Amino acid sequence: MFCLVKRVCEIPPRVLQFKMCRRRDLNTNLSYTVLRHCWMKSLPVFSSTSFRRSSTQASKDAVDLSKFPVDRIRNFCIIAHIDHGKSTLADRLLEMTGAIAKNEKNKQVLDKLQVERERGITVKAQTASLFYSHEGQEYLLNLIDTPGHVDFSYEVSRSLSACQGVLLIVDANQGIQAQTVANFYLAFEAQLAIIPVINKIDLKNADPERVESQIVKVFDIPGEECIRISAKLGTNVEKVLQAVVERIPPPVGSVDEPFKALVFDSNFDHYRGVVANIAVFGGRVKKGDKITSAYLGKTYEVNELGLLRPDEHPTQKLFSGQVGYVIAGMKDVKEAQIGDTLYLQDHPVEALPGFKPAKAMVFAGMYPMDQSEYPGLRSAIERLTLNDSSVAVQRDSSLALGAGWRLGFLGLLHMEVFNQRLEQEYNASVIVTAPTVPYKAVLSSAKLIKEHGSEEITIVNPAQFPEKSVVSEYLEPMVLGTILAPDIYTGKIMGLCMNRRAVQKNIVYIDDQRVMMKFLFPLNEVVVDFYDLLKSLSSGYASFDYENAGYQAADLIRMDILLNGRPVEELTTIVHRSRGYSSGKSMCERLKDTIPRQMFEIAVQAAIGNKVIARETIKAYRKNVLAKCYGGDITRKMKLLKKQAEGKKKMRRIGNVDVPKDVFINVLKTKEK
Ligand code: GDP
Ligand code: MG
């Protein structure tokens, strides 16, 4: 089954793409109040530093890119399982080619977002152009560092569709993991040249021999093609650069064709408008050119263009096969769609195919804390989704929460990261409802079918779950999950999977100790805490990845949660009937642990239809903490009151109960008891 025939010479030439994102708005010395004001009003922001910065940059020595015809260009991305060393290898490649100064402090320099730094993971693919001399010739290498987690695979697939080759990194200690397999297939299906790299050979427990034989067995790649490196120490990294030039084919396209470029990423800058990252598929473009967007038919003048190294590096022109950024006075986020084609106004071309939209796996409602923040939040969401095009956005409104949105994400981590970026980069605070997977219902009522215009409807909001009486069948989304683990854990893993309503599809040994298992899972069984449980029962050795596997009929019911008798819309979920009782019970228990005690008793109940199936009680405070503060304790009293008021701002009031706004996600994330 793993017999794959792959040869570099068979790879059809393609043109690259690149991506990067920037947070220039937060790098300026503008006061937060000014930024927030402009952001609320959607005004462009101007700052003296920003101007100084662009103009000094523009006057810097611009590289003459005409020196790099397509046969001197290589476009590749680095793919791997999470933590196998992609970003560290990118650091070394940047250092060796002089893009950044050598410094021991260089650690994952391409992970620029605050959320990436805090979590130590890459969530956004990043581009860097490198100059490299090989056998007397100067080459322009465009590298993309990609995220490894399954929730960000859209970044990987977009990057891949733009490159001619990949570096597939495998940890010499851990060997092939679930995302290694998933990423390999993405690259293989895109018919890219694959250079296997075994990293971390400096580790005491490294076993490159074993990893090499896994690569031969699982991917059918000859062992001698593997390069053994230590990205941390820089051992053999030079060989990687040589292999990039020798084994990856150049892009196609000629400078004599009319200019044609694909917008593969974009990002909104408060004072310069849209910064579009483009891959040039033919011809050339220069400052002052009039370019047209195929998507909107609007024409703009090119104000600035250049390379990403990884910071913006202005140049005079960009030529076929090259990758860079362009700023052309697009002021509205809708003007720079990812997948759009740009061409010269006088030479229209046929639009490039663009990208397939990402398929959302989890949906959640997002609402402003206060309806007056709605316009500001709308603009923040628009700008952030410009930088993360895998998020699906739909307007939504609810009686309890007012106007808001229903957003679709590729997974729970993706949703958390999006939420964190909203807070950190846009200072937007939101209420997020309990996430749900997209269920479907086949309607039986002729009236409803007419209303919806089709027999089958997708339910992304549990509050809109249609009743059984008008439905002939409910369907739930399925995924094909891949688990790789040492064989001693096989029994335990199977137990966990069976408990999650999984059906085993396949099991193979990838070497004498490790097994690869495939299971068909209902998506909602793996989306929340499955991976955590899998990790803990395998002492961290198992890895997991999944892909879409269509829909299957399922017996579904709607479960409501009541606080002191009032239904909480954010916590309504759709569950499988067989799990109704257990999930109701554990939800109540977890809410009991997450909602802070208040001055009165709170009843937490789970209900299916009108029937309460579980109940927990949150006891009242025994004493009023303020009651003790009399007389001289006035400052303490003030402090406590202030603290309480601050805390309340982050609360949502349901009936008379104050609920912290992150309870709605946290309650699902906490492990089941
Ligand atoms: P990514 O998730 O694939 O981008 O992985 P990172 O580059 O963030 O690296 C994950 C961890 O592995 C970091 O703590 C790195 O310092 C460490 N690491 C990366 N390459 C090496 C290596 O060659 N040797 C050792 N010992 N550690 C490495
Ligand atoms: Mg990384």
Image (cartoon, rainbow, N blue to C red):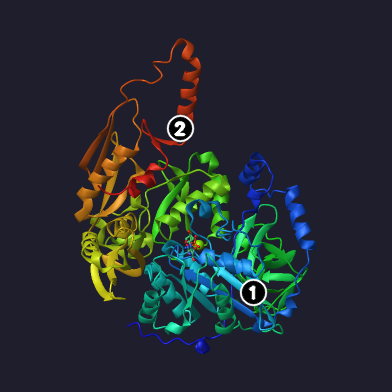
Q: Position of residue 92 (x, y in %)?
A: 58, 67
The answer to whether 323 appears left or right of 638 in the picture is: right
Residue at far right of view = 59
Q: Splitting the image into 4 quarters, where does residue 274 fall?
A: bottom right
| In the image, residue 556 above or below residue 584 | below
The answer to whether 493 appears left or right of 88 in the picture is: left
Gap between marks 1 and 2 measured at Cα: 50 Å
Residue 647 image label: 2
The answer to whether 246 appears left or right of 367 in the picture is: right
Q: Residue at x 38, y 21 (%)?
A: 625
Q: Residue at x 68, y 60 (%)?
A: 330
Q: Position of residue 81 (x, y in %)?
A: 43, 67
| In the image, residue 140 above or below residue 116 | below
Circle 2 residues within 10 Å: few <14, some 14–19, many ≥20: few
Residue 261 image label: 1
Q: Position of residue 118 (x, y in %)?
A: 50, 51
Q: Nearer the viewer, mark 1 or mark 2?
A: 2
**Disc 2, SS:** helix
**Disc 1, SS:** strand
Q: Position of residue 313 (x, y in %)?
A: 71, 64
